[in-house]
Amino acid sequence: MSLWICADVKPSASQFYFFSKSFDADAGATLTARVCGDSRYQLYLNGHIVSEGPCQGSEYQTYYEEVDLTPFLVAGENKLIAKVMYLVEGDFISIYRRSKPAMWFDGTLTVNGSSTEISTDESWICEREDGISFHHCAGLHPSMPPFETVHGVSKRAPVTVKAMYAPDLGNKCFNPFGLSEQYILTPRPIPQMELFPAREMKIVRRGEGFIEFDAGSYTTAKVYLNLQAKAGTQVRLIYAECYTLVNENGHGYKERRDNHSHETSQLTGAYDIITATGEKQVFEPFWYRSFRYIRVEFDADATPELLELTYGSYFYPIDHAGTFTCSDERLNQMWAISRNTLLCCTHEMYVDCPYYEQQQYQMDSCLEMLYTFRLTADNRMPFKSVTDLGHSQLADGMLQANYPSNFTQIIPGFTLFWILMLREYLRYAGGSREELARVRALSGTVDKALECFEANKTPEGLIGPTPYWTYVDWVPTWPYGIPVGGRTEPVTVTCMMYAAALEAAAQICDTVGRPGTAQDYRARAAQMIDRINEHCYDKEQGLYRDTPSTQAYSQHTTVWAVLSGAVKGEEAGKLVDRTFNADIPLAQCCFSMNHYMFRALELANRYEYAPKQMEGWQKMLDLHCTTWCENPDWPRSECHAWSSAPIYEFSEMIIGVYPTENGYNAVRIKPHVDGFGLTWAKGTVPTPHGNIAVEWEKKDGALTLSVSLPTPDMRATVVLPDGQSVEMEGNNAAFSCAI
């Protein structure tokens, strides 16, 4: 019988525990297992890592891994070791934990048709590692994951193993009376992370007591340090996103990110600490690290005899079926950097940034999901994200802004982003009966979320203030990202987003067989738009105010006026023109909001403004960024995937591929060939049915376009720049027109 086992202590500090078991196996044996741990484990068989987890999930789902250990079996004695990192409350990685370090292993050893159980029970040995502790890096974000302090040699103390209970997976970990077990187990829904081969780092600077290494580009990785130094020498590994400079007041600031030659340039950041033993030793941090540069510091009078530093990049395994190249090398670089940024923010969940919080936020995840679907048709990560975030709903209907999380944070607009995210998931992956059932199961969460906003209406019919954080965008002049006046009266953008979310919910309900609810949502949206146009539109300026009473304006209200349908057709285009040519100050969209700016330009038939919006990305290229920053001016984070909008723009607009029916059951091919100064472009777009390939070229006043569909059954409408609209026949076709 496979039991949950635990160390018979209630730790007061985060520590490592090693659970181990030896067993014999005959030649030709196979071993498969289901594995889980609390808080986080790495499983080794005969010294080879074979699994790590549990996959990050919510308090309602504890994921377990299913593993084939056969390739690592040997004839004779074998040894399993589970290295468990137990985290106390306050030590922050978004993994739910209970009160004890625990392990569950349910293995089946088979040889010649005969099976033996290899499972966790009280015969397993447990040791606590007292030679390693965890610390928080002073001056950095308090919710960063803990970093390691190695106190010289290993100091393992035996700990009594206690049996807890045997999980009942057949009943999904609930007993006949509906009571749940401590861990509600369900299979891991995504693959293991991809660990790339170890690579050496280039030394870019060294001096008394330090060496600085460059990985060449920003990455998230497993780090390997080989070290030999005088016993007692302290070695510190500092992980830095980029070089910063120091001004005359002693404050750091960012210019060219790889400027290591400036006299005030420095590397600062989170760090691990290793105390040397005098012998050769290897240090591998348990959790991944995020960096472009690593600074190794040591006692000035104790330079290490051996110091080798390598890393293996570590991401979610995206297959990169989506591609893009064009005649402008700048755009090709933007595509590559956008892809790298997305990879660094995609692990067992989408994260806002891999360096600081490592949290899955709805706004970030909605965008990251859209960019993911432009690179791969693998919908496992997108659906896991939608599901995890849906599990965060509170009693009043709001969803937590970031989840899974060990604290509760609410941003009302982010609940609306989750509804938009579910609609987009349906668009890109929802063509099958199975996917429709998945979306329908989440539609009740949509209903409750929308009712929360309905209950917060003011007498004027707008969405009023809540006790939560009314964040919109990191506009420098908006305190805490909130439009001026937004703490005490309705925020126009929130009201517009609510109308857009109602329409998205109506489309979901139409698709999953709830037409009456869809009709109700559209009526509510129309009513909200009437209230917005009555109370928030400034007729004198021809713009929407940020709140009903303030004389403050932004690009954001124009964007969401278009996306919500508050203005349509040529009136939407005129509103965009007034916004881009206004003679009064307007708050500008930052990187997080630019995707929606682009969508509003597309919908308003004003996409000619898009190239100017790309200037922020060009600025980051000029600063030698290898991932995109969180915001344009004084970015805290150098890696924020909400800034990877070029992936979507180049794929959906320049290549021109867009699903017109859920799940790509029908598609529109409408390449945007003007505005970016391109002479040719080509790329592939993944779909659940296979890849769509598009290539076009402008030459001698004519456009030639070739399209390849994955199957002749896919319905595709090709829209040419001269206005022609052609229904494709077959799965390969060529077109041309004058331009």
Image (cartoon, rainbow, N blue to C red):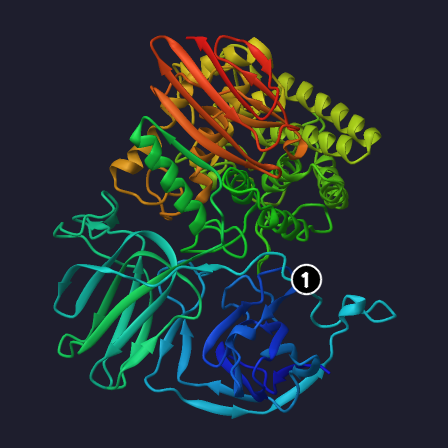
State which quarter of the image contains the N terminus. bottom right
Residue 299, image x, y percentages:
18, 76
Q: Amino acid at mark 1?
A: Gln
Q: Which residue is at the front of the view, 31 or 513?
A: 31
Residue 669, image x, y percentages:
54, 22
For residue 247, above or below residue 604: below
Identify the image quadrant of residue 635.
Answer: top left
Q: Is residue 163 visible?
A: yes
Q: Residue furthest right?
A: 177
State which quarter of the image contains the C terminus. top left
Residue at horizontal 40 percent and vertical 40 percent from the top: 338
For residue 159, above or below residue 461: below
- Total count of labels: 1
Q: Which residue is at the front of the view, 13 or 57?
A: 57
Residue at horizontal 37 percent and vertical 72 percent from the top: 284
Residue 593, image x, y percentages:
48, 33
Disc 1 is placed on an element classified as loop
Q: Which residue is mark 1?
A: 61
Q: Is residue 87 visible?
A: no
Residue at horizontal 43 percent and vertical 68 percent from the top: 146
Identify the image quadrant of residue 700.
Answer: top left
Q: Is residue 535 left or right of residue 132?
A: right
Residue 437, image x, y percentages:
76, 44
For residue 34, above or below residue 130: above
Identify the image quadrant of residue 423.
Answer: top right
For residue 307, above or below residue 599: below
